[in-house]
Image: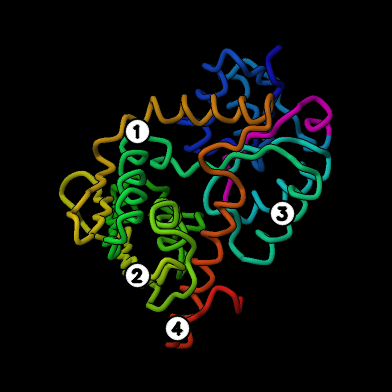
Amino acid sequence: MAIKVALVGSGWWAHDVHGPMEQESPDADLVGVWARNPERGQAFADTLGVPYFSDFHSLLNECDAVDFAVPPDVQARMALEAARRGKALILEKPLALDLASARTLTETVDALSLPTISCFTRRFSPEADTFIATAHEWALAHTLLGIQAAYISDGLLPGGVLPPSGTWRHGQYGSMYDLTPHVMNMAIHALGPAVAVQGHAGRFSSFSITHESGALTNVSISSIVRTNGPEIFTECLYSTHGIATFDANDVDYGSVWQRIHKEFIRCVETGVRPTADIHDALAVQEVLEAVVRSSESGAAIRISEL
């Protein structure tokens, strides 16, 4: 039996990714859409051939799971409502715009043992699997040193792919909150939990993470660099054994989103934890908070002190 899924959001990411993902899945029955803008939400629901719900709570009455494609502050608030109603959750990154909201949502999910998946897109690629498996292999040989990572794009420049106005990405830490989760989820999976962060966040963010393993990750982030070509998302793993590289331009995103939805369905049906869930999202949220605090204080921030 197909799982009944509600879709929250009607923006470009809902149109381009989440809506098609739900429509194309043989294991999902898309039962309706809710959006902050009723006219746009109705139009989007019409294109999907499903009802538009002006009342979110009424939509929750019709579904088993909720797929979120809204800004992180909206997601944190509405996902908490859905979780309290016992719904499984497909979550975007970052989980929230503040650590307290992310922790509250995670605690609620844990208390109710709810299935979740977090859409760290590139992490669900075979290229990421290979990169992380290599890191684990080298860790066993005690040869790991660290990762040099960069996510650089022109998404917020005129003509870029991101919305030109009215978006959380344009805030002081917007690029850092938008791009860092992809980088750090992979780095944490490769090198282990983060324990300390130091660096600067802004129009061009640069920071360093110390992992529990003793390895280091150095990160550069910006959405206002004219790349004159594809965006740059690379992670280079260094060890005394050699160098391994992940390049997001090698990823087949169609296959990635199919995998995300299949893993979510399996998680709902069997309880098997997916490649990335809300706990992975919370670990990244802690790093985001630490980067902001380090940027504002100039000091290194320990994750345990947040």
In the structure shown, which secondary structural element does the residue marked by tag 4 occupy? loop
Mark 3: which amino acid? Leu
Magenta run includes residue 25: no
The image position of residue 192, as x and y in percent, is: 45, 59
- 2 or 3: tag closer to the N-terminus: 3
Q: Is 147 positioned to the left or the right of 110 in the image?
A: left
In the structure shown, which secondary structural element does the residue marked by tag 2 occupy? strand
Please give the range of residues in magenta.
58-71
Magenta run includes residue 64: yes
Q: CA distance from mark 2 to mark 3?
A: 27 Å
- 3 or 1: tag closer to the N-terminus: 3
User: Badge 2 is on which residue?
Assistant: 205
Residue at 39% from the left image edge and 70% from the top image edge: 214
Among the 4 quarters of the image, the one containing residue 28? top right
Label disc, if present, on residue 126 of the rendered structure: 1
Which label lies toward us, 3 or 1?
A: 1
Mark 4: which amino acid? Ala
Disc 2: CA contacts within 10 A as few (<14), some (14-19) or many (>=20): many
The image position of residue 79, as x and y in percent, is: 71, 46
Mark 2: which amino acid? Ser
- 3 or 4: tag closer to the N-terminus: 3
